[in-house]
Image: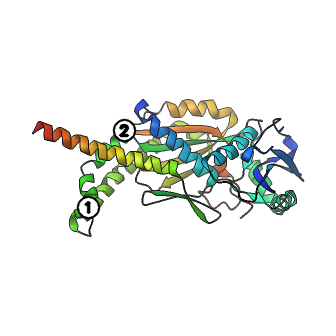
Amino acid sequence: MTTHLYCILPHDLRAALPAGLSGLAGERVRVLHIDGLVAWVSDIARTIPVSVDGVRAHDAVVEAALETGTTPVPARFGQRFDSDDACREALRNRAASVESVLADVQGTVEMTLILTPSTRRMIRDLEPVLPEMFDSETEAPGRRYLDSLRRREAVTGAVKSAMDELAVELNRAAGALVRRATVLEQVSPLPLRTISHLVGRDDVNAYKAAVTAVEAGGDLRFLLIGPRAPYSFSSLTDAGGRHGMNLAD
Amino acid sequence: MVRDDDEIDTEQLVLGDLLNHVLDKGVVISGTVTISVADIDLLVLDLRLLLTSIETSMRNGIERSMRELTEQS
């Protein structure tokens, strides 16, 4: 068996591990002490089963840590070490950086906004273009097909402009409560923008009230997810756009 | 916020966001979502369903519109 890392907490805040908490494959979650840090881990087979259920199990342990009142630094899914000692060594080697990230996120949670056009808008906007795009005779490199691509790009550009305006509105409404922010623009047929905000625990209700008061025009919509552990603000490399602490790569 | 008719997609958006946050390996290329862990590409069907459902909706929308046009003419 090997050791799977879920999250890291500061030792001095002594977040209590809930009794009977289980993680991946139903294994009991236990605590590793490493100097000024505490890691929540469990045993795991050498091959980590990657699945939606596995991801949910990992996140559930991280959320349990968040609910203790202490903010954990979440590890990414798949942080597996050959033994507890190997996990301790990895954490000792990065202790200063880990402690710095922990200090940054204490007292905070992550709130996530997902901006996307409504399905209805996508159908309406793209409908005139799609017959050409799905017509096999026009899929060969030809002017009509390229024109259809350009028209689709124009539609997508209009959606992105509308999302820019919505993002400004959301920032205007809740910006005063936001300590840090990251934006992830996904490249997909469905325009998606994920905005992650680091918000004080005491400000969560005010934040929710502020953003839910914003009216999304232009057939756009936004989802509000959170509070959750600060996945978007836990990178050791500070590379930006990365989620969760990564020690095992 | 989110309307009722978007609820199905909402569930998939939330799942996609969870996977993106916890795995941090999500890459969307040409409408296919792959998630790589330890350099192994894994297809996440739930996310593909999101894209498929959008595409299907759009196709259905076209077919419905064309049927309506045919009936009108």
Callout 2 and callout 1 share a chain: yes
Would you say residue A92 is visible in this rendering?
A: yes
Q: Is mark 1 on a helix, strand or loop?
A: helix
A138 on left or right of A118: left
- Badge 2 is on which residue? A219
Name of the residue lying farthest toward the bottom: A141
Looking at the image, which is closer to me, A150 or A56? A56
Q: Residue drawn 80% across and 53% down?
A: A99
Residue type for callout 2: Asp
The percent position of residue A44, horizontal first and vertical second, equals 77, 53
Q: Residue drawn 61% across and 38% down?
A: A226
Looking at the image, which is closer to me, A149 or B50? B50
A247 on left or right of A146: right
- Badge 1 is on which residue? A136
The percent position of residue A115, horizontal first and vertical second, equals 47, 44
Residue type for callout 1: Ser
Q: Residue drawn 62% across and 66% down?
A: B39
The percent position of residue A105, horizontal first and vertical second, equals 72, 46
